[in-house]
Amino acid sequence: MSLENLVTCVNCRVGQVIKMSRPTTRSKNKRHRQEDNVDITSEILRKIHTTGEITDDDVNQLYKTWKPVCQGCRVNTKDNPNCFCGLIPPLNGSRKVGLWQKMSDILQALGPDPTKDLRASDTPVGLTNLGATCYANSILQCLHMNKSFRGGIFSLEPDVLRQNPVLDQLARLFAKLHTSRMAFIDSSPFVKTLELDNGVQQDSHEFLTLLLCLLERCLSNSKVSKARTIVQDLFRGRVSHVTTCSQCGKDSEASSNMEDFYELELNVKGLKTLDESLDDYLSVEELHGDNQYFCESCKTRVDATRSIKLRALPDVLNFQLKRCVFLPKTTMKKKITSAFCFPGELDMRQRLSEPSQSELIYDLSAVLIHKGTAVNSGHYVAHIKDEDTGQWWEFDDEQVSNLGHHPFGEGSSSSPSKTVETKPVHPSCPEPRNIVANGNHVNSVEPKSSESSTNINAEIFSSGDAYMLMYNLRQARKDSEKKDKVSGASDTEIEADTVSLHDGVSLPSHLCEEIKNWNASYDDACQQYELNKEGELDRITKRRQEVRSILSEAPVRSTEEAFFWISAEWLRQWADNITPPVLDNTSIQCLHGKVPLSKVSSMKRLSARAWNMLLSKYDGGPTLANNDYCMDCLIDGARTVVCGDSYRDRRTIMKQIATEAIQGTSVDGAYYVSKAWLQQWLKRKILDAPSEGDSGPTEAITCPHEQLRPDQATGAKRVLVPENLWLFLYEDSIAVKPDDLSGCSAFPSDSKQCSQCSDDLSEEAVKEDSLRVVKLKQRQNHEKLAMGKSIPLFPDCKYYLVPSSWLSKWKDYINASGKNVSSFGKPETLDSVIDMLKCEKHTRLLERTPELVCKRGTIFQKTDGLTIITENDWKCFCEEWGGTKEKGISAIIEYSCNAGNFMVGNCEELPVCEEHLNSHEEVNTENESRQLAIRTCPEICEECIGERESCELMQKLNYCNEDIYVFFARDKEAPKSFIEASDASFEPDRRVSKRSRKTNNGDLINLKVSGSTSIYQLKMMIWESFGVVKENQILRKGARIIDKESATLADMNIFPGDKLWVIDSEIHEHRDIADELSDQKMNVQHTEEGFRGTLLTANISSQVV
């Protein structure tokens, strides 16, 4: 066996022995005691290697069969083959997966439980929301809960239903709503028949109007009078538009024309009660001035009055509350969310144009509610009263909830989900009254005057979300109750040919069998699920009992008892999986078909009874008994341990010799090795065999010519080691990388350094010395520039201009030393740099000169793109860096009032070096008030500079996903420092905080924007961050107001890093940002599609009054 294979075998087997002896405690503070077990195992293996004999005691010690049965481990330990702890959880415990999951999690594999959808006996059925069909569900529930309408649909002839898909699907839908065993049903067949878009929210009022018109046309083909005119009989009323002449008092001819209506659209803006809205609807309009009426009797234009007269009222009176209003200023729609009062009983007798002699008392039967503040979004629910029981129900798609005897829930209810409080009387309602509030709905009893439509003792309800009110004529209900006999408590009773409903109405005969089969299939699904559930629960229970039973028999109680080895991994899977695999012990077998010592930590010691129970049920194998330990593997392992001991002993001795060599105390050095490599070798732990890091002891000191590198080369430090240490290192390197000998070349102590490498080093050293001299001379020639000191400037003296970037690069280059030399590159030649400063078109200067400042007669420059240097510096630079003196850009400083081709500076005070001030203290300061100017040759090219700055500005404006900062000034004024910062130039390299910060007088946030972001979008971000509506935002950059919402940030010269500030004008009222986002989304569409393209608008015209 090779040394590498031997070491690998030692690592495997001895490492397993070390792992098996690890203690089971998890405490990091307790002292681990592996040494005893490792020493015992190693001692036994050494004895086996020496004697060649293996006793029973040796086997018991090596395979750990002597260890007691474990009782209290928190986990299943690998160190003890008699430990079966942790394979299953405690009695009341569970796991996330497998056999020991919670029963509820296991049952999820059976699919959804259909019994959860079972309908309660006294609860109406809900309708599924297909995405955004809550508007249709609410209307369909209102129609279905109307007994008369439902009865009319059910009385249709089968032939009519077969010929008309809309009526057929509506009848099926109503039949399922009445007879379903499920708590909710699928409305998709009816919705698909109408060709509605499931994902688009629509207006429920528009849907009802179009649906009634469609049904009226479809029902006209029926021969059953009750069904044919059911829509007209229930929902149609009559009105007339009356115009009366103020002179002759006659009505116009058109006043006698009566028009049909199916609902009354009432204003709610500025109105607080249903009475006020009815008064507004029936109010008299004065026609005068340009609106005068032409009277046929008077034959002239005269003042007149116009009003709406109610001629006849339907049995079901629908009030559409116009909560959606158009705002001309913003050209958007807005929902009115103010509270609106309406009664439980409504007397319409006095509202007719000709008061009726009989009572016209209507009872509130349904309230359609629109939840949400946005016009084009939100959610519709319906609160509907059961005509038989008087109970109110909330229909929220699939969810149907009992509200008691009040449309918004029982006011006296103690349910914790309802808020019950006392509120003051609404100012629109005369006389004090007691009010019980449920959320935003108010129930109260209010005394009313005799002229009101509300009865004296009627309950008054209030809601800010009520969208449609439905009232049923009380007399019509009484007449209906006389004709129809109410059955008992049972809702439905399905028979072979008919379905008898509780109100005496029968289903169409062709639907009877279908409804019966539909309910039967649901019952079968529930029954099948229960059977599957019981079977699964029984299977899981039996499996758990089996696992607990076998594990209780698993431990071997004595050393004399026969036992079998089993794979710990298979045992874990068997104990944890619902469906266990076939018994498999191949993973714990060695090549000889026995049990090797290296697998002790991967197997368990099982009693004969437990083994036979597993083998008889799960088959498989192979069977590994207590005497099936592998003699060959034990002997081989013993030999490996002894070899490992020998290597460790040798390496320990060699480390001592290497330490002496590093310290220089070794006197018998014979071979060179890398000093850095040997230092790292000493730091490594002593292992049983060589590792990857033991290769290449001389790689760092071998040159490309395979000779000894000069000692002066970087990383080529070396040390002499004795011959025995070198041979040890060489053997390890060859053992690790036998195919790569380049890293272990032998260099005896008399080896010569590579002459070629030495020559190269000498040449490089000469070059470095020469370069140091050149740099030193340049530092002396340009002392102030090299040290970064300011150069005092004087008028009428000739100077030169060089790029500041080139000068900075030159300064870094000549000042670099030591390891930093290679970090700084050589500057470009001066001629090429100067040429880049001139435009190609006019050969003029493309950069503006630096700004000048003056104090006490001494002039200094503010270094920017160009730096002013002396004529002597320029001359030296030309000699040193390949420049032509005549091609330089000269500059002369002058005092001038009209700059012309000058760059003008000012004499403002600027901190300067004290040495400059002291040297010119006696200079006359009479020129300090005059302007400084720089005259250059060649001249500055304003045309090309302007073009370049325009391009740079365009690039600057074309930014994307950059930060700007917005300050919310709560005290109406931003700090002075912030206003100044808003006008300052942006510093792209300056680090800024990305977090929102709160200051003493406002908030500061950063926003990610682009140059194409509009001011409108920016205001929406500010609205979302600070809660200030966009109409109230006064946005500024510095002192400039930014108010063009259609403009982009680039248009308004807002750059990355700019600081804006905003105040709240508080003029407009606060509203939810969701309204704006919803309206914005709708405005993106070209037109409101509504129900265009559906069956509701196919050749149908509706009339709304």
Image: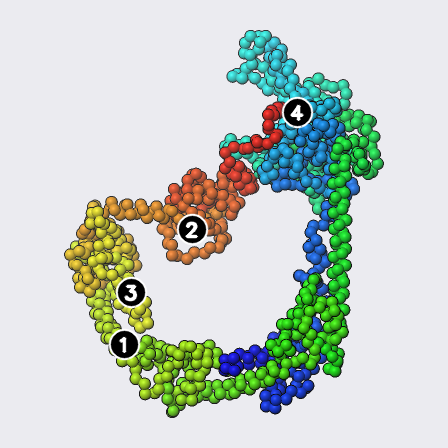
Between the C-alphas of marks 4 and 1, the distance is 106 Å
Q: Residue at x 76, y 45 (%)?
A: 523
> Number of labelled discs?
4
Query: In terms of sequence position, does the residue under pointer 2 or pointer 1 come before the other?
Result: 1
Q: What SS does tag 1 mark? A: helix
Contact (Cβ within 8 Å) of mark 4 with mark 1:
no
Q: Position of residue 975 (x, y in %)?
A: 43, 50
Left or right: residue 115 compared with residue 291: right
Q: Which amino acid does the dot numbered 1 rest on? A: Leu
Picture quarter with the C terminus: top right
Is there CB contact under 8 Å for labels 4 and 2?
Answer: no
Structural distance between the alpha carbons of marks 1 and 3:
21 Å
For residue 310, above or below residue 857: above
Residue at the spot x=74%, y=63% of the render?
Answer: 543
Q: 875 left or right of 391?
A: left
Residue bearing the label numbered 4: 217
- Residue labelled with disc 1: 761
Question: Residue under circle 2?
Answer: 962
Neighbor class of circle 2 (other Cα within 10 Å; few <14, some 14-19, many 20+) is some
Q: Nearer the viewer, residue 746 or 672?
A: 746
Which amino acid type is marked by label 2? Answer: Glu
- Mark 3 highlights which residue? 825
